[in-house]
Image (tube, rainbow, N blue to C red):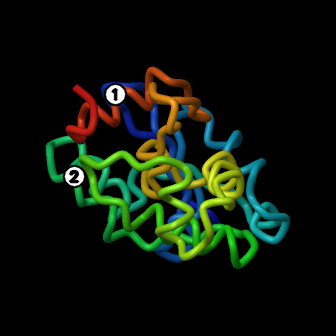
Amino acid sequence: MILTQTLTTPIGPLSLLVRENTLVAAGFTADPTELYDRLAPDLRALPLERVDDVGKAAQAVRDYLDGNLTALDAIPAEQPGSERRRKLHAALRAVPPGIAVTYAELAERAGMPRTAARAAGGACARNLIAPFVPCHRVVPSTGGVGSYYYGPQVKRWLLRHEGALT
């Protein structure tokens, strides 16, 4: 079974999907089925149950919003993907709050050559666990905040909240 809870945040609803105390999806939507539909087939085979509290993941969001910018880091998260994508997601989780990196820098942090910037962009685009896997901390080398699955206004807010954007 996958448990889901939707939290109210300053930038809109944030839905969390948890299986056996591990976050399998999170995103800025009021409809957790949007996230559920993006899960791997083996997880979509499990029933989705709305609950009042998914536990530690929900508390981590509250703590993050209250200013503990590293609170999301302690939550176990798991998502499907190739070995390359898993390395990129791990490198994303290692980018500290208040820091923005380029796609090329993310690829380097994952131990890949600079030519893997396209793969870094793909890993961000397919990230199912925002903001816990903080793809909002990746910006284009040409400036600006770039794109974000949940919109540039959400990305800007997260970067400002963390002090990476003034």
SS type, badge 1 = helix
In percent of width and height, residue 130 lies at 50, 48
Quadrant including the C terminus: top left
- The residue wearing badge 1 is 157
Residue that lies at the very extreme toward the left in this rendered image: 67
**Which disc, if any, is residue 89?**
none
Q: Residue at x 70, y 57 (%)?
A: 119
Q: Nearer the viewer, residue 64 or 165?
A: 165
Q: Nearer the viewer, residue 100 or 10?
A: 100
Q: Nearer the viewer, residue 27 or 143?
A: 143
Q: What is the tally of numbered marks visible in this picture?
A: 2
In percent of width and height, residue 127 lies at 62, 53
In percent of width and height, residue 154 lies at 44, 27
Quadrant including the N terminus: bottom right
**Which disc, if any, is residue 69?**
2
Q: Residue at x 55, y 54 (%)?
A: 104
- Residue type at mark 1 is Trp
Q: Is residue 129 visible?
A: yes
- Drawn side of residue 105 relative to residue 88, left or right: left
Q: Is residue 4 visible?
A: no
